[in-house]
Image (cartoon, rainbow, N blue to C red):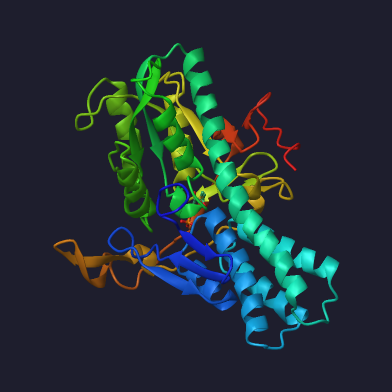
């Protein structure tokens, strides 16, 4: 168990400099930790998505760099900084869209290059600097996620009060942005958690979170495998939906009809981010743009809903060096992730074996971008650990976010 009482994606022993990650390919049926012995292991684990989520891959990257340095010293292996910095560059290429990983790696590189002669070998001074950096990255992420939760809830309260809304409401989310994607608590799912615990009917609030609808999140199913796992663990009521059910769900609840037994209207769609750029355009899991476009339709004159589309992102995800979302590199994933489903063969809650089953015609063209870009015009609020940004004259002013 981690600091948040939830499952830990990353386990790091500061004294032994030992790193383990929860193998997210085995969730929800198995909780298995795998050891990361250095940069190559981290590269493979990130690429295979045994660990995923923008903040988590940056933290694992930073800890893996530290483990690499520590192992070289322990084994008295000669490791020159020039060679070490090259392997950090290689680590960045494991996944290109989330800025967090490249930011952390580049900051470590800059720190080493500024303080040490790169012709020297790894020593204890270099090791200590990397250790301080990696531990702060982990600890700051955890603290910041709680602040994002609070800021998100304040935005929710403000919005519902302005509308004079009373009663239960629901939230839609996509992908997994919880403890498993971060050092703990989560970003978008962190807001859901904080809202669920802080806005309660029993405490006499005017409005409260009644239900959550996590999207399945094809093709990798982070929603159905990981978010449902976290929501169930937290005892937050939810109903899983496919990505293509969102418009129907909104329409059904808006008409006062029920979804199963649920009737609370959806008031917020909350997503995380892999990169938020200068104008507020945001890259996140494929399907996020579609959610924002649907929200926009429901807010149109024809529908007149008051549905807010929120992005939750820490400072480490903001990249002011890119002006618009056009400049973001979108990772393309292998075709087999779309044409097959992977899952365990389970009997009596016991995993017998992992199976891969084909679900498409062989030898066909497949397009599999892992992320899409939501234009800032469709985003109502960007919630960070410092504050919530709302548009002024149609524009996000993220300039002060250093
Ligand atoms: O491909 P993934 O699972 O790494 O994608 C993750 C997301 O898109 C998350 O929304 C994002 O990284 C934020 S996680 C706090």
In this view of the protein, can residue 102 be seen by the observer?
Answer: no
Q: Is residue 378 visible?
A: yes
Q: Position of residue 22 (x, y in %)?
A: 42, 63
Residue 172 vs 177, above or below: the answer is above
Q: In the picture provided, is 273 more to the left or to the right than 180?
A: right
Q: Position of residue 50 (x, y in %)?
A: 44, 66
The N terminus is located in which quarter? bottom left
* Residue located 42% across and 37% down the image: 193
Residue closest to the far left: 348
Image coordinates for residue 51, horizontal then vertical, percent: 47, 63
Q: Is residue 65 above or below residue 254?
A: below
**Viewer-nearest residue: 128 or 396:** 128
Quarter assignment of residue 277: top right
Q: Give x and y (percent) for residue 101.
A: 62, 60
Residue 234 located left or right of residue 290? left
Figure check: 135 above or below 231: below
- What is the tally of numbered marks visible in this picture? 0
Residue at x 31%, y 24% (from the top left corner):
264
Residue drawn at (25%, 71%), measured in percent from left and top? Answer: 355
The C terminus, quarter of image: top right
Residue 17 falls left or right of residue 196: right
Q: Residue furthest top?
A: 164
Task: Using the image as rendered, state which of residue 299 and residue 39 is in the foreground.
Answer: 39
């Amino acid at each position: 168990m981690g600091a948040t009482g939830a499952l830990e994606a990353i386990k790091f022993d500061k004294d032994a400099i030992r790193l383990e990650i929860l193998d997210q390919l085995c969730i929800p049926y198995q909780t298995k930790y795998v050891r990361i012995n250095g940069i190559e292991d981290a590269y493979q684990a990130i690429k295979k998505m045994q660990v995923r989520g923008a903040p988590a891959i940056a933290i694992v990257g930073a800890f893996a760099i530290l483990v690499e340095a520590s192992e070289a010293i322990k084994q008295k292996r000669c490791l020159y900084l020039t060679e070490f910095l090259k392997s950090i560059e290689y680590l960045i290429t494991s996944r290109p869209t989330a800025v967090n990983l490249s930011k952390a790696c580049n900051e470590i590189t800059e720190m080493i290059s500024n303080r040490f002669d790169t012709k020297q070998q790894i020593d204890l001074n270099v090791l200590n600097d990397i250790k301080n950096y990696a531990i702060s990255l982990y600890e700051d992420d955890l603290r910041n996620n709680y602040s994002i939760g609070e800021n998100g809830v304040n935005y929710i309260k403000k919005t519902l009060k302005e509308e004079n809304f009373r009663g239960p409401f629901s939230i839609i989310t996509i992908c997994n942005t919880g403890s498993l994607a971060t050092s703990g608590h989560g970003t978008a799912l962190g807001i859901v958690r904080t809202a669920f615990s802080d806005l309660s009917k029993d405490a006499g609030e005017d409005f409260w979170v009644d239900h959550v609808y996590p999207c399945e999140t094809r093709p990798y199913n982070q929603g159905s495998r990981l978010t449902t796992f976290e929501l169930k663990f937290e005892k937050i009521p939810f109903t899983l939906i496919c990505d293509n059910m969102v418009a129907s769900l909104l329409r059904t609840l808006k008409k006062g009809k029920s979804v199963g037994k649920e009737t609370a209207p959806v008031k917020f769609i909350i997503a995380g981010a892999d990169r938020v750029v200068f104008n507020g355009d945001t890259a996140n899991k494929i399907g996020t743009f579609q959610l924002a476009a649907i929200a926009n339709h429901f807010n149109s004159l024809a529908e007149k809903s008051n549905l807010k589309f929120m992005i939750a992102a820490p400072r480490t995800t903001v990249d002011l060096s890119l002006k618009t979302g056009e400049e973001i590199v979108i990772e393309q994933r292998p075709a087999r992730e779309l044409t097959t489903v992977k899952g365990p063969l389970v009997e009596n809650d016991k995993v017998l074996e992992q199976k891969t089953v084909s679900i498409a015609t062989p030898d066909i063209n497949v397009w599999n971008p892992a992320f899409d870009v939501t234009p800032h015009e469709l985003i109502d609020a960007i919630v960070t650990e410092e504050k919530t940004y709302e548009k002024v004259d149609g524009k996000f002013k993220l300039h002060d976010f250093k």
